C-alpha cells in the first residue's frame, strides 16, 4: 500500500465511522439512555430509507423529503411510545426483546405489502452529485463528505442537548432515577416520549441520508442493527462521545480489516469489540 | 332355505365386489396414469419472493400452453414456501416427498436450500428439477441421476465473461465478490476463462456477505490499476456497488464486467450508473428467436408484467418434465424411462434451444449483454454451447 492509498483508506475509515455514528445515534438515546433493548432500531432506519424513496419520488427533491420526513418520523416515534413502549419501562428486558422483535417482523411485512420487494435507488441531489479527484484513477463523491459533515454536526448537537440544556439535564436525571424526577414535578412520561421520538427520528434520518449511497432494499434494517449495538456497547452505554469514538474505531477496524486481512474481515469488528470490553468492561466512556 | 339365503348373499356380495372392481379399480387406475403430482418448493416470501413467483408463473404458463396438462396428464400442485431458509430445507422437502408423495420436486432459488432439497431427493429417489439455484456442486460432486437443472451453474456466466474480457484485449483483472459459495464459484469461472485467454487475475478481493461498504475495496482496486474488474453481486448490493463504482470515478477508467445478475431487475434503481455495463448470462433482452417472442407476448398478457430469466427457467422446468412424461405415455410413471428421456431431451427454451450435459446441467449459449435503459440487450454470444465442467460428478 503506497502512501496516497494509505491516506485515502484513512479517509474511507473516518467517513464510514461517521456514517456508523449517524446510524447508531438513535440507539444511543433509546438503548443507552432510556435503557430499552430496541431491536426495531434497524426497522426505523429502513423506514427512513423507504420514506426518503417515497417522498423523493413524489417531491423530486431529497432535501425537501428529509425536511418532511423528520417530523413524520418524530410523530411516528411518539405514537409508538404512547401505544407500546410506555408500557415497557417497568418490565424486564425479555419483554422488550419480544416486543421489538415482533415489530421487526411487522414492519418488514408492511414494507413488503406497501412497497414491494424490489430494490430501489434514490438519486443524490444534483448540487452534491459531483466527485473530487483524489488520485489519477480514484475520486471521492461530495455527498459522502457531506454526510460526514452532517454526522459531526449531529454529534456536537446531541452532546450540547444532553450536557448543556435543561431538557438534557432532565433526561439524564430521568435515566438515573425515574421516580425522583417525577417527584420533583417533571412530567416524566412526556420526557420519555420526547426522547424515544427523537431516537426514532434520528434512526430515520440516518436511513434517509444513507438512502442515496446505500440504495433501498428489503432487509436493509438488519444490516445496521448489530453494528449499532456494538457501537453503543463499546462506546459506553449512554455516552454520545463514546458512541462517536466507538464508531470511528469500528470504521478503522472494518476498513483496514478488509484491506489487510480479507480472510478475517468479518471478524475484525468483533475482535475490536472483544478487546475493548476486556480492557474496559463498561465501555470506553462509561461514567461512574 | 338357509343354504339358499346364504347363496343369495354370496351372489350379492360377489356382485358388489365385481361392481367395485368393474367401476372403481379401472377408474383408480386411469387416475393414477393421468395425474402427475408436482411439488413446488420455492420462496414466496422474503427477498427472493419475486423470483419464486416468476418461476411458478413460467411453469404454469407452459402447462397452460399445453392445454392445462402435461403429455395428457392432469397436473396437481403441492406448494411450499421455502422462505429461502436452508435450516428448513430438509423438513420442507420431506413434507412434499413423504406426506404429499409428489412425483417431482421443483425448486428452488437459494442454493443452500437447493442443496438440502437435493439430499432429500437423492435419499428418496424423487425426481427433482432445479429452476434456478446455481451452486456448482448440485451438478458437480453431488450430481445424481434423478436431479436435473434448467438454469445454470455459477461457473458458466463467469467463465464466458472471462473469455470475453480476454478477447477484448485486457491483460490484467481484479475480481471482487462477497465471501460466499456463489461468488467464489463465479470468480473461479471468470479466472478460468480469463487466464485461458492469456489474461492474468492480479487479486481476488472479497468482503463478508452481505456487506455493502465497498469504499475500502474500491480504493484497493484504484491502487492496483487493473485493466478490467469482474464482480459478482445481486440485489441491493449490486445497486450499491455499481453506484459506488461510478461515483468513485472508476467506471470511466476501468471497465466493469459481471455475471448478468448484477443488472437483472436492478437497472432502474441504479439510475444512470448502470448504463453501458457488459454482463454475461444465458438470457438477454432482444433475442432474435420466435420462441422467445411468443413466450414474452403470452407471459406479459397473462401476468401483466414482463418475464425475466427466472420465468424462463420455470417455463423450461415444465418443458423438461413434459419430455420425461412423453416417454411413459398413459402408463405408470416409470422413473427410469423418464430420466432417460429427460437427459436426452432438447429443450426449446426462449433463451434458445439447449440440451443437458451428462451431469444434467444445460449446455447453453451464454450471451454478452449491454445495459441500455432498463434492458440488457444482447450484443453477441459470449460462449456458444457452453457446458459446465461438472468437476467431481461421477455419473
Image: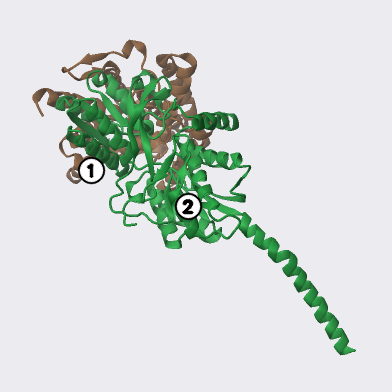
Chain colours: A brown, B green
Residue at 29% over, 24% down: B244
Residue B81 in picture, x, y percent from top left: 50, 47
Q: CA distance from mark 2 to mark 1?
A: 50 Å
Image quarter where the C terminus of chain B lies is bottom left
Considering depth in this image, is A71 or A281 the residue closer to the camera? A71
Q: Secondary structure at mark 1?
A: helix
Q: Which residue is mark 2?
A: B341
Residue B213 in picture, x, y percent from top left: 28, 31
Considering depth in this image, is A32 or A140 the residue closer to the camera? A140
Q: Label 2: how many residues lie within 10 Å, few (<14), some (14-19) or many (20+)?
A: many
Q: Determine whether A194 is above or below B6 in the image.
A: above
Instruction: Give the image quarter of residue B48.
Output: top left
Please give the chain letter of the residue carrying mark 2. Answer: B
Task: Let me know if residue A31 appears in the view.
Answer: no
Q: Is residue A41 left or right of residue A248?
A: right
For residue A267, the mark is: 1
Please give the chain letter of the residue carrying mark 1. Answer: A
Q: Are marks 2 and 1 on the same chain?
A: no
Residue at 39% over, 49% down: B360
Amino acid at each position: 500500500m503506497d502512501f496516497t492509498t494509505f491516506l485515502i483508506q484513512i479517509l474511507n475509515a473516518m467517513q464510514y465511522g461517521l456514517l456508523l455514528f449517524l446510524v447508531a445515534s438513535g440507539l444511543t438515546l433509546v438503548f443507552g439512555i432510556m435503557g430499552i433493548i430496541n431491536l426495531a432500531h434497524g426497522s426505523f432506519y429502513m423506514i427512513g430509507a423507504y420514506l426518503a424513496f417515497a417522498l423523493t419520488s413524489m417531491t423530486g427533491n431529497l432535501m425537501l423529503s428529509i425536511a418532511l420526513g423528520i417530523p413524520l418520523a418524530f410523530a411516528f416515534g411518539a405514537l409508538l411510545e404512547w401505544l407500546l413502549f410506555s408500557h415497557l419501562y417497568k418490565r424486564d428486558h425479555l419483554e422488550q426483546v419480544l416486543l421489538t422483535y415482533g415489530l421487526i417482523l411487522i414492519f418488514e411485512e408492511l414494507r413488503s405489502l406497501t412497497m414491494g420487494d424490489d430494490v430501489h435507488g434514490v438519486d443524490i441531489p444534483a448540487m452534491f452529485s459531483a466527485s473530487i479527484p483524489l488520485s489519477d484513477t480514484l475520486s471521492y463523491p461530495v455527498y459522502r463528505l457531506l454526510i460526514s459533515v452532517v454526522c459531526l454536526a449531529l454529534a456536537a448537537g446531541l452532546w450540547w442537548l444532553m450536557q448543556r440544556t435543561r431538557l438534557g439535564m432532565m433526561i439524564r436525571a430521568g435515566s438515573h432515577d425515574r421516580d425522583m424526577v417525577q417527584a420533583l414535578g417533571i412530567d416524566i412520561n412526556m420526557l420519555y416520549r420526547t426522547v424515544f421520538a427523537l431516537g426514532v427520528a434520528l434512526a430515520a434520518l440516518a436511513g434517509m441520508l444513507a438512502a442515496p449511497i446505500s440504495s433501498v432494499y428489503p432487509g436493509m434494517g438488519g444490516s445496521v442493527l448489530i453494528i449499532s449495538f456494538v457501537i453503543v456497547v463499546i462506546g459506553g452505554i449512554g455516552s454520545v462521545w463514546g458512541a462517536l469514538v466507538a464508531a470511528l474505531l469500528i470504521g478503522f477496524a472494518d476498513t483496514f480489516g478488509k484491506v489487510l486481512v480479507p480472510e478475517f474481515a468479518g471478524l475484525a469488528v468483533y475482535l475490536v469489540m472483544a478487546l475493548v470490553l476486556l480492557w474496559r468492561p463498561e465501555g470506553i466512556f462509561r461514567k461512574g | 332355505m338357509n343354504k339358499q339365503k346364504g347363496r343369495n348373499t354370496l351372489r350379492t356380495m360377489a356382485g358388489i365386489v365385481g361392481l367395485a372392481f368393474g367401476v372403481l379399480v379401472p377408474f383408480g387406475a386411469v387416475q393414477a396414469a393421468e395425474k402427475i403430482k408436482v411439488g413446488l418448493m420455492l420462496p414466496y416470501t422474503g427477498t427472493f419472493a419475486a423470483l419464486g413467483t416468476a418461476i411458478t408463473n413460467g411453469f404454469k404458463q407452459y402447462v397452460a400452453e399445453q392445454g392445462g396438462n402435461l403429455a395428457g396428464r392432469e397436473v396437481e400442485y403441492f406448494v411450499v414456501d421455502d422462505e429461502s431458509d436452508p435450516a428448513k430445507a430438509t423438513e420442507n422437502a420431506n413434507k412434499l416427498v413423504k406426506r404429499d408423495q409428489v412425483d417431482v420436486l421443483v425448486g428452488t432459488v437459494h442454493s443452500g436450500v437447493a442443496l438440502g432439497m437435493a439430499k432429500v431427493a437423492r435419499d428418496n429417489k424423487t425426481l427433482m428439477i432445479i429452476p434456478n439455484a446455481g451452486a456448482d456442486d448440485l451438478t458437480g460432486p453431488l450430481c445424481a441421476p434423478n436431479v436435473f437443472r434448467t438454469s445454470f451453474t455459477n461457473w458458466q456466466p463467469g467463465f464466458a465473461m472471462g473469455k470475453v474480457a480476454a478477447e477484448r484485449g485486457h491483460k490484467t483483472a481484479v475480481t471482487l465478490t462477497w465471501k460466499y459459495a456463489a461468488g467464489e464459484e463465479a470468480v473461479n469461472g471468470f479466472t478460468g476463462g480469463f487466464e485461458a485467454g492469456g489474461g492474468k487475475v492480479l487479486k481476488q478481493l472479497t468482503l463478508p456477505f452481505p456487506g455493502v461498504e465497498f469504499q475500502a475495496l474500491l480504493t484497493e482496486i484504484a491502487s492496483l490499476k487493473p485493466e478490467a474488474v469482474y464482480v459478482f453481486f445481486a440485489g441491493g448490493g449490486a445497486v450499491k456497488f455499481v453506484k459506488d463504482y461510478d461515483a468513485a470515478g472508476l467506471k470511466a477508467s476501468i471497465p466493469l464486467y459481471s455475471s448478468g445478475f448484477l443488472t437483472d431487475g436492478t437497472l432502474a434503481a441504479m439510475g444512470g450508473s448502470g448504463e453501458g455495463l457488459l454482463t454475461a448470462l444465458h438470457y438477454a433482452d432482444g433475442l432474435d428467436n420466435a420462441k422467445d417472442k411468443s413466450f414474452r407476448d403470452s407471459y406479459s398478457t397473462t401476468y401483466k408484467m414482463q418475464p425475466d430469466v427466472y420465468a424462463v427457467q420455470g417455463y423450461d422446468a415444465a418443458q423438461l418434465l413434459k419430455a420425461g412424461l412423453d416417454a411413459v405415455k398413459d402408463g405408470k410413471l416409470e422413473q427410469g424411462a423418464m430420466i432417460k428421456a429427460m437427459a436426452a431431451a432438447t429443450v426449446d427454451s426462449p433463451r434458445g434451444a439447449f440440451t443437458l450435459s451428462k451431469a444434467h446441467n444445460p449446455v447453453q449459449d451464454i450471451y454478452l449483454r449491454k445495459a441500455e435503459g432498463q434492458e440488457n440487450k444482447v450484443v453477441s454470444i459470449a460462449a456458444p454451447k457452453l457446458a459446465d465442467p461438472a468437476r467431481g460428478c461421477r455419473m
